[in-house]
Amino acid sequence: MSRLATTLCGIPLKNPVIAASGTFGYGLEFASLLDLNKLGGLCTKGLSREPIAGNPAPRLWEAEAGMMNSVGLQNVGVRAFVADKLPKLRHYRVPVFANVFGYAADDYAEVVRVLEDAEGIAGYELNVSCPNVKQGGIFFSSDPACLADLVTSVRRIAKRPLMVKLSPNVAKIEPLAQAAADAGADALSLVNTFLSLAIDAKTRRPRLGNGFGGLSGPAVKPIALRLVYEASRAVAIPVIGLGGIANGTDAAEFLIAGAQAVQVGTATFWDPRAPVRIARQLDRFVRDQRLQSVRQLIGTLQLKQGIH
Ligand SMILES: Cc1cc2nc3c(=O)[nH]c(=O)nc-3n(C[C@H](O)[C@H](O)[C@H](O)COP(=O)(O)O)c2cc1C
């Protein structure tokens, strides 16, 4: 599959298809279902300072053409990840991106400090879709100054490549993309889930235990493509695109919009092998387009005029 070989922030990838955070556990859960060595990379479930039990059930709801979740960032905590999961992940030749979150810049910094001492991590992905408790609950992902402070404090600690995962729940993505890049991010990934609400009309209650949830899957793809296009034009650092990718053509569309790599999330719920299948389909697409390298697709959207 050499047509698919690429690099991201200096990290060689066999292909540009990465398993997305929160939909692929810690990777190990999928080792009996697919060959982890065939992935372009994998993002772990979000890791926090201390273990988190997550939100009340139900946590998943199948929406029209998509899925809603309110898992609530359940995870084993960074120390248990380093002690129990990472040693097993090191048996595979797959770049591991540790997804990190917290409720204050100190939390993020502490998680990254613990990960810095561990072997077997290719880079970090900061999930910034959390409320900043120290600043009255403003979301890191919606305030450029707040985001810049966070990225600056993690950048001081992180020696490995630092990816910042942006939320789509903003009026304009460019100021956030630029704030993260100026503060030292090596790459951006987008999008995270869309804030949403499903209602049971008979009981007049929310379908999810936590009330609101995050929408993902095919329903969000056109919005995600627009955001990836806008972000990739606003910054010079690489953008990784995701949101509703379910087949190789979807992946190609994100590359054409300007992404240098893609991630696959919700599709893994109905096809656990989706990331590997999508890489194979993308390889066929590249071959059928008579291209030597998948990189030749990146940022090639044809526009008669600019998009307004
Ligand atoms: C069940 C579930 C859990 C998720 N957990 C995380 C997480 O821990 N950290 C994170 O950055 N994104 C998380 N996400 C967001 C996904 O990584 C991805 O950004 C989003 O679902 C859009 O991509 P998709 O449409 O391919 O799923 C989660 C998504 C789902 C569906």
Image (tube, rainbow, N blue to C red):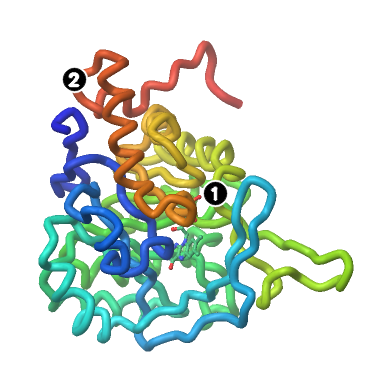
Frontmost residue, 208 versus 189 = 208
Furthest-front residue in this view:
32
Which amino acid is tagged 1? Answer: Gly
Q: Is residue 199 left or right of residue 110?
A: right
Query: Quadrant of residue 222 in the image?
Result: top right
Whether disc 1's CB lies below 8 Å from ligand 1 is answered: yes
Residue 240 marker: none
Query: Quadrant of residue 6 in the image?
Result: top left
Whether disc 2's CB lies below 8 Å from ligand 1 is answered: no
Residue 298 vs 159, above or below: the answer is above
Q: Secondary structure at mark 1?
A: loop
- Residue marked by disc 2: 292
Please identify the quadrant where the N terminus is shown.
Answer: top left
Frontmost residue, 6 versus 237 = 6
Image spot of residue 297 (x, y percent): 32, 24
Q: Secondary structure at mark 2?
A: loop
Image spot of residue 284 (x, y percent): 29, 25
Residue at x-position 29% and y-position 64% = 27
Q: Is residue 94 left or right of residue 265?
A: left
